[in-house]
Image (tube, rainbow, N blue to C red):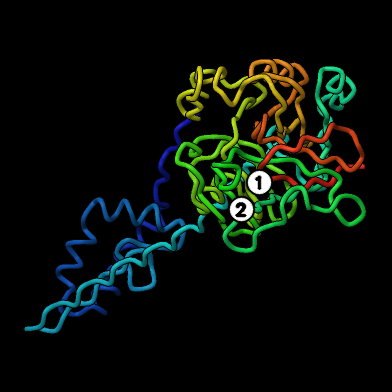
Amino acid sequence: MSRAHARPSPAPAAQAAAPEQSASVLSALGSNAEQLAQLVANPLVQACDSVLGLFGASCSGPAGTAASPAKSAAPGTTPAPAKPAARPAAPAPAVPPSKLTPRNSQRPGVDSNARPPLDLAGLSRAGYTVYPMAAVDVLYAGAKKAPDAPLSQQPLGGKGYDAVLSGTFTTDYVQSAGPIVRDGKMDTQGHAKATGRGGMAVLQDGSIVVGRAEGRTNEQVQATFGAPGNPVRDFMGGGALLVENGKAVGDADLRGRQQFDQGGGGIQAQQMRTTQHVLVGIRDGEAFALVAHEKSGASMQRDLTGFGLDAVVKYDGGSGAAVRDGAGGSPDYRGKNSTGLGIRTRR
């Protein structure tokens, strides 16, 4: 418990000098002398003088001390109102912290070695072809402005891509059902059902982010996936978020919030049937594109959480799945899809 400090008493010399100081002040103030004398005689003012006197100030002293008496207005005039205190400057707005973590993104120059590397050989034995991604472009041949070449015509090898995979769900294989952003500009907002689904974003510095969308406009995509000073360059939404924060996303979420309600709905929806599927995942700050061969939604959740992936979004499958692998690591699937991923792999 802290000890209370006793209030210091004025020294005898200071007490003796007080009448002389008050007299000099009274003579200087002239017509206000009687009023000021009453003020100085007030015990509270004397006590205040005793304390402030230790710091060279006074409650009743002349101008320049802690509390100076106000000047009197000339007879017959109205005293000028006191100036209001200056309003303190508003604090600078805080820069929001980055939302990018090793559990949802791959960032250039940021390494995470929290766990052993992803078991690529184990995933291959389990029925997956895995592409460790160094960079990725969102492709959209169905765009109304500056459409990309169809996936079947995208260059492979050399200055081209190492692999070209199909992307999100479409309407009649042409119009994207999910939001698409290329070079910072939105091509389409997609279908309303895509509002709370999963997506992959590529930021200006090349960071790859996987997570849940919170809307379909460019502004909402930027707010959800962008980082301070590092906006979204490319985005593909409308996918099924199967894994979030290292855990399988529940059936109710897939059925309700993500609105996969065709067929049996949820994890049993038509889009989750056993066939080939294209996915993008994050594990410990590394991004991977995956092709699942003859897998269902439930089996992919079980496999990918078992291999320790932190976030996974599943794009189209079946007749909408297209795979062109320049290195021959995966069978070519020639499904029809106007959206895709142009991938350069890590060496």
Q: Which mark is residue 133?
A: none
Residue at 89 percent across and 43 percent down: it is 326
Q: Which mark is residue 339?
A: 1
Earlier in the chain: of badge 2 and badge 1, it is 2
Q: Are the two marked residues, 2 and 1, in contact with CB atoms closer than 8 angstroms?
A: yes
Residue at 60 percent across and 30 percent down: it is 241
The kind of residue on which mark 2 rests is Gly
Is 116 located above or below residue 196 in the figure?
A: above
Q: Is residue 246 left or right of residue 53?
A: right
Which residue is identified by label 2?
142
The x and y percentages for residue 335 are 70, 37
The x and y percentages for residue 147 are 65, 59
Q: Nearer the viewer, residue 220 or 4?
A: 220
Q: Nearer the viewer, residue 20 or 137?
A: 137
Residue at 20 percent across and 73 percent down: it is 81
Residue 49 appears in the figure: yes
The x and y percentages for residue 91 are 48, 57
Mark 2 → mark 1, Cα distance in angstroms: 7 Å
- Per the image, label 1 sits on a secondary structure element best described as strand
Q: Nearer the viewer, residue 64 or 85?
A: 85
Q: How would you rate the neighbour count of disc 1 (Cα within 10 Å): few for under 14, some for 14-19, many for 20 or more? A: many
Q: Residue furthest left?
A: 76
Residue 249's image quarter? top right
Is 87 located above or below residue 133 in the figure?
A: below
